[in-house]
Amino acid sequence: MPSMLKIAPESSNTPVERMEAPTTGPLVVAIAYDGLCTFEYAIAAEVFGLARPEMGAGWYRFATAAVDSGVLRAHGGLRFEVDGGLELLEDADLIVMPGWKGAGEPVPERLRGALLAAHARGARLASICSGAFVLAATGLLDGRRAATHWRYAEALERAHPQVAVDASVLYVEEGRVLTSAGSAAGIDLMLHIVRSDFGTDAANSVARRIVMPAHRNGGQAQFVERPVPKRPESRLSPLLDLVRADPRHRWTIADMARKAALSERSFLRRFAEATGTSPGEWLAGVRVDEARRLLEATALPIEEVARLSGFGSTATLRHHFSRATALSPRDYRERFGHGCKGARVAEA
């Protein structure tokens, strides 16, 4: 079934039609809805719906199925028509849920039922970003790991406590249910599906066409900005400022308690109340932040970054840094270091 997506600006009454060359491979159906996430949908259409004659006649077929009726709207001032309704899911081999209307928006029973029926007969279900809320509503993620955008992770956990939400990864494959993190992480998941279906060479070819790495190391933790905690209104405030100003100092609990003019026992209790964590975990976070700054702004050797950030050894730096960002210090510098300042915005 060749896909035909008709798109026109809000002010136009003349849709543009694009017919794609027929293929005989797996049928991929993307779900559309009023308020469609344009970028997430475009990821599925680009990977699975673009004509790729170099891949042969066995390449994917692509169609778009609407949850809602009539002419629908998408982000960016677009109106669109689709190939059909949810009946298209009956023949789908892979169903892609490209985002959703919102974390608190209910999932229509007809969509939930269609997804469950498709999965029961063997179809794979994949979500991008907030599309995980739709898959979670089917119950198919209960007791399984799932990914979503890090901003939605807590909301997904609250709404579906049976789901093991992993906010640190780019995508998760749990049998025939696959979920990805925010927006561009959907590209990583779609390339993973191509790799699984057609092999590494095919995935590499698609990745080259869209100018993306065929496989990205690390997870979405690398893109999460560490929030600056509110400064506790207590005698700990000057101490925390002092530690932040000199993270390379060999701070001990006894040292910090003495600076705060508290017994070690009182210091530990008040520190937990003020920061929500232990002195060791907090100090490691301060040092990771300093290491990130040095890796981004300087060309210092990794050994010197470890020393100046207070970790002492590269092994200790690597352990804490990888745990916090899912990247090694060297990989982080390659992505975000001096000369790559646009990388964080472009990839986040």
Image: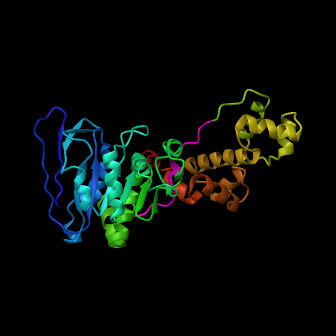
Residue 225 lies in quadrant: top right
The question of residue 221 being in magenta is answered with: yes
| Dominant secondary structure of the residues highlighted in magenta in the image | loop
Q: How many marks?
A: 0
Q: At 73% across and 34% down in the image, what residue appears?
A: 274
Q: Where does the image place residue 135, in percent across and percent down from the top left? A: 41, 51
Q: Residue at x 65, y 53 (%)?
A: 305
In the displayed structure, 106 sits above or below 54; it is above
The reply, left or right, for residue 77 in relation to residue 108 is left
Q: Residue 278: percent from the left, percent from the top? A: 75, 44
Question: Is residue 235 shown above or below 302?
Answer: above
At horizontal 71% and vertical 37% (from top left) the residue drawn is 275
Q: Nearer the viewer, residue 24 or 244?
A: 24
Magenta stretch in the rendered image: 214-228
Residue 337 appears in view: no
Q: Quadrant of the N terminus?
A: bottom left
Rendering coords of residue 169 (x, y %): 51, 55
From this viewpoint, is residue 180 visible?
Answer: yes
- Is residue 123 positioned above or below 109 on the image? below
- Farthest top residue? 233
Left or right: 3 in relation to 92: left
